[in-house]
Every structure is written in structure tokens, then in C-alpha cells.
Image (spheres, helix red, strand yellow):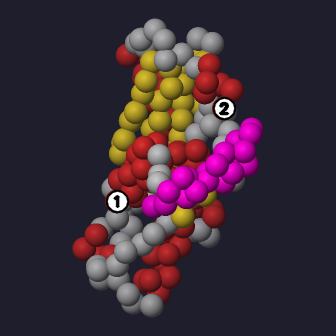
Amino acid sequence: AEYGMLPRATGSRTRREATAGKQSGRTQEIQRLIGRSLRAVVDLQALGEVQVTLDCDVLEADGGTRTASITGAYVALADAVRWMEERKLTKGQVLKDNVAAISCGIYRGNPVLDLDYLEDVEAETDANFVMTGAGKFVEIQGTAEGAPFSREELESLMALAEKGIGELSVMQKAALGA
């Protein structure tokens, strides 16, 4: 996956990384996360000797760009796989499940789903969840921005994430006409 923010995706213009001649560590880490998340639901044997590159261009960065990129990249991947399968270019069913991601956090003492930028920068806790449509976890990343968070708070964020990812899975299927 290739991840990048367009220059006006943020409040003030951001310079394209290509003009600097290299990608930031953040961009590289996000690209690896997207790749790991998608590989978790792909049967690589069925895919065969094929390389798929997915472009994740952020048009508007209002929090959760990495999670939105994973969710959207799955739709693009599923569309590409369908195209390959229709042409008998695969060795079986490539996709084992769908995958989606969402951010959650503790904002002003309350668990919040899908933090926007202002909530994200002020959140006491920030977490990203990547899950399959079957409800299995691919990745959980959580950080206390100030005081540590409790197990109960983590469980409340996990419950929110499960609900949100369930809704995203329905949207993914609708986008794919499934």
C-alpha cells in the first residue's frame, strides 16, 4: 500500500513528501500497518505470484487517516480481486474475510468512537483497532496521552470499536455491491 496526504488535506498546506526525496517514518509505518491488515484476510497461495499496489491518498485529514486508509484499501483490494477472479487469474478464493479499522479514545473522560482531529489531539487515550468482519482482531494499538488508562476503559474502547467496525463492514459490502 502507498499512503500519502494531499497537500491541502490538513488545515495548512503540507509539503508533498516526494519533494523532500523520502517518506517520513510515520508514512512508512502507516504503509506497513495497511499491508499487515490486508494480508491478514488474504490467502496468499490463492493470490499467486501477483503484486497488488493500493493507493491510499488522504483527501481530508480529520483524524483517523490510517484507519480510514485500511477500511478503504480493503474495498479497493476486494474490487481488484473480483476483477482477477472473473478472469481466472487466481488459484482459488483470495479473500478469507473483510477487514476494517477505526479509532477510539477517551476524550474528556468519555469513550468516543472515530475521533475527529480536535478530539484526537485532546484525547487522554487514543487507540486504533483493526478487525475482520468475523470480529477477530488484527491489530490493537493504544496509547495514554497523559494518565494511564484502565482495563475497563480499554474494554469500553474495544466494545465501541467492535460496533463501529461492524457498521464499516456493512458499508464495505454495500460499496462492493455484496
In the displayed structure, would residue 75 be above or below residue 102? below
Label 2 close to label 1 by CB (< 8 Å): no
Q: Main secondary structure of the magenta part?
A: loop
Of the residues shown, which amino acid type is indicated by label 1? Answer: Arg
Crowdedness of circle 2 by 10 Å Cα count: few (<14), some, many (20+)?
Answer: some
Is 169 or 57 nearer to us in this picture? Answer: 57
Q: Residue at x 58, y 44 (%)?
A: 65
| Any part of residue 111 in sight | no
Q: Earlier in the sequence, mark 2 or mark 1?
A: 1
Is 108 or 93 nearer to us in this picture? Answer: 108
**Residue closest to the far bottom:** 87
Find disc 2 in the rendering and name its residue. Answer: 117
In the displayed structure, would residue 92 be above or below residue 41? below
Q: Residue at x 41, y 11 (%)?
A: 148
Residue 158: % across, % down: 45, 30
Q: Residue at x 59, y 11 (%)?
A: 109
Magenta segment, which residues? 1-21
Q: Tag 1's secondary structure? A: helix
Residue 39: assigned label = 1
Residue 75: % across, % down: 54, 63
> Image quadrant of residue 119?
top right
**Residue closest to the far top:** 147
